[in-house]
Amino acid sequence: MNYFRKQSRKTAFLLGFITILIVFNGFSQEFGDCEQALGRCMFDKIRQLPNFVQFYNGIAYCAIGYVFCLKYLDE
Amino acid sequence: MFLLCWLIMTIPFFLYTEGKEEKDWHLEEVLSIGSLEEDTLFQWVGVAVDREQNIFVTDTMDYSLKKFDAKGKLTKQTGRKGQGPGEFLAPRYIDNTKISIYVSDQFNPKIQVFDKNLNYTHSIPIPLPISDFSVLPEEEIAVATLSTTKSGRIYIFNSTGKIQREIRYTNEKLPLMMDMVNFEIDSQGSLYLVYNYQDKIEKFSPEGKKLWSKKLLGVKKVQKEKIASLVIPSKLIYKDIALDNSGNIFILGGSFSKNPSRDVYILNPEGDLLNTITLPDTTHCIYIDAQNYLYSRANEGVTLKKFKMKY
């Protein structure tokens, strides 16, 4: 039982790490204000890993904030 | 013979244009609230107007909900930064009934309800990020959201925050954010929605049947950007929708319009384009009150303008 718990913890950690890598791959490019805010928001949501449900819900909040930013700033 | 030919050719044209009821729409500014020289508004976001022409505005910069009288005088203000009752982190959209004002918050999973004097009354938990909402009869709330798993739905919540039903406006499996919409529901229960990232405006019957779908700008593909490994659309096609009391539909155009964030397309309830008006300033939203006055933004959110629509 302990073995399986350890394995699932390892898997969750690995998935979280891979997600961080994926999310921030290529984020060094130059972006506008809204894009940078989106990047910061997503970075903030990564703290919710390995809770993937909360993480994806957080991504949705970030994306809605991004759209609002685009609407408001006319970017 | 020539005259006969000319008549045969031109009669259909006259019949067609008569059916379209072409009118020359234009705007006359009747009120302006806030300016760069004063501290009335800092960055207003949502607006709603009651039958007495009181104007309710959310201001995201000072975490507040403000009430102005019909002459534009600030009569009440409430709210401060926080997550408690009557507090905001990022006040956004606003709607009203005869007795209450409903306010959403970007970072709080709830809609807060205030009376007309801006006294906090209660909150309705909404466990979804809100991209637009509308208060329906019997305190039901229709919410447009963004889901990473279930796309193309508007959820109807009851007054305790439980999902009562959902309106599925597309069965397509769309990439992230491509299903984002702004919407209005008229007094008969018909749903009008405009996609933010698709050239698509649609009307649904109260039973949820799609009645028509229109394109105005001929945009086939929206520009996308890779941001933090997410490929997401980066140019808005339409920004907002509003209805007047004759059932005409007003659509605020985005980056693909001739005058971005200023052009407003006017459609009749059948979806025919009647006219286009151009606002004097760029805006993030449009609102039309029960007396057909149109409200929009100026000075990047420091000023709220009220226009009389003439045609």
Image (cartoon, rainbow, N blue to C red):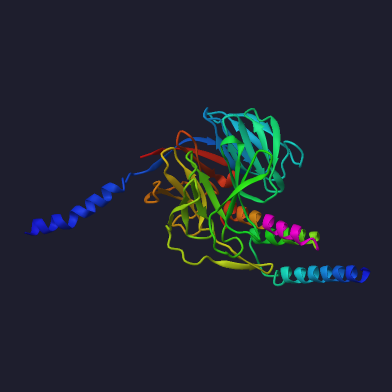
Residue closer to the observer: B223 or B305: B223
On screen, residue B34 above or below B7: above
x, y percentage for residue B156?
Answer: 60, 45
Q: Which residues are magenta?
A: A50-62
Q: Is residue B296 left or right of residue B43?
A: left
On screen, residue B147 above or below B223: above
Single out the residue that lies furthest toward the left: B1
Residue drawn at point x = 60 percent, y = 59 percent? B151
x, y percentage for residue B150?
Answer: 63, 59
On screen, residue B272 above or below B50: below
- Prevailing secondary structure class for the magenta stretch in the rendered image: helix
Q: Is A60 within the magenta?
A: yes
Q: Is residue A2 left or right of residue B56?
A: right
Residue drawn at point x = 57 percent, y = 61 percent? B178
x, y percentage for residue B184?
Answer: 52, 45
Residue B215, image quadrant: bottom left
Q: Is residue B258 left or right of residue A25?
A: left
Residue closer to the observer: B276 or B50: B50
Residue drawn at point x = 81 percent, y = 63 percent? A50
Quadrant in which the N terminus of chain A is drawn: bottom right
